[in-house]
Amino acid sequence: MMNPMVASELFIYPIKSCYRVSVPCANAEPRGFEHDRRWMIVDAANEFVSQRNVRKLATLRAQISSRGLELCAPNLDPISVEIPSMPDQPVIARVWNDACETWPADAKTDDWISSFLEFKAKLVYMPETTKRRVNPTFANNGEIVSFADGFPYLLASSASLDSLNKQLESPVPIHRFRPNIVISGAPPFAEDNWRLIQIGGVRFQSARPCIRCSVTCTDQESGTLLGSEPLKTLTKFHPIDSRPAFAQNLIALDRGAIKRGDAITVIE
């Protein structure tokens, strides 16, 4: 008998491109899980900073606090960051092709971030008033997204990872793919064919497969680039339009809490 399909793990990433936080439950909101990627590091030109070009971001850890974030990173004392108030002059930060109105953290935090990265940078926050739109090619009703690359949620399957790892000389952990939702109990790559699912009481629509980048080749504990895998194998083993693909981008159709162990129902 097959094991039931469940949400086996849930993750948020308080700061874009930084370390994950495993959570037992999470509130699904239109732009993503509550607290997921609502903060972002930008450079002196207010362009987003990513693990694609600054791999040590993987080692910057952020925990949610009652007033904002608690940050820690190698060789630095921890620091507390408060959610900023609306400033007189918002920072217009760019993430991919989107220019977003953001609220900057305080100067002490910027100095800490700059010291960690060894170049001038600052931390910005996405307020509720900022509405960054999902690509209309894949959205139905003007859905919004946080500072995530393009979609509010990413779902990955343990069975799909097991299938991929059988093709690799050295297996990779699910964390390399930076999912929000990890599922178990489904056949490998069954998620590729789902259009509408329900987790707990929340419905999610599949938007498109996730095309993968070099972040999947970076160790998420040390920030070290480990070669060309799993991208090299994915390009041959599981391509979409000749590009390496793994996991599914989702849009939430409802608000509500989901938790580890919640059953997954395929509606369509």
Image (cartoon, grey):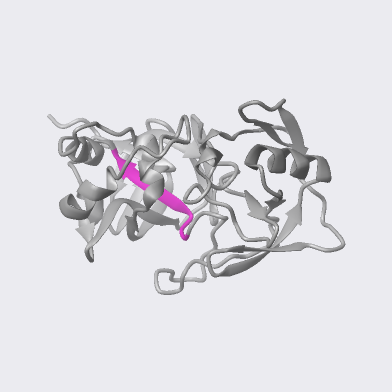
Which residue is at the far left?
1
Q: Which residue extends farthest front?
A: 118
Question: The N terminus is located in which quarter?
Answer: top left
Can you see residue 67? no
Q: Which residues are magenta?
A: 150-157
- Count of numbered tags: 0
In the displayed structure image, the side of residue 110 where residue 243 appears, left or right = left
Q: Give coordinates of residue 246: x percent, y percent.
A: 29, 50
Q: Residue at x 27, y 43 (%)?
A: 230
Inspect the magenta stretch and tell me whether residue 245 lies in it. no
Instruction: Please provide percent x and percent y for residue 35.
Output: 60, 43
For the stretch drawn in magenta, the main secondary structure is: strand
* Image quadrant in which you'd find residue 45: bottom right
Q: Is residue 151 magenta?
A: yes
* x 33%, y 57%: residue: 211
The x and y percentages for residue 23 are 51, 31
Question: For the point 84% across and 58% down, which residue is it?
Answer: 87
Q: Nearer the viewer, residue 73 or 13?
A: 73
Quadrant in the picture for residue 47: bottom right
Q: Is residue 131 above or below residue 23?
A: below
Q: Where is residue 25 drawn, in percent x and y?
A: 50, 34
Most foreground residue, 145 or 28: 145
Going by the image, does 138 lie left or right of 115? left
Quadrant position of residue 163: top left
Who is closer to the viewer here, 78 or 150? 78
Which image quarter is the C terminus in? bottom left
Q: Is residue 238 left or right of residue 96?
A: left
Q: Outermost residue toward the right?
A: 88
- The residue positioned 36% from the left and 42% from the top of the image is 217
Q: Is residue 168 visible?
A: yes
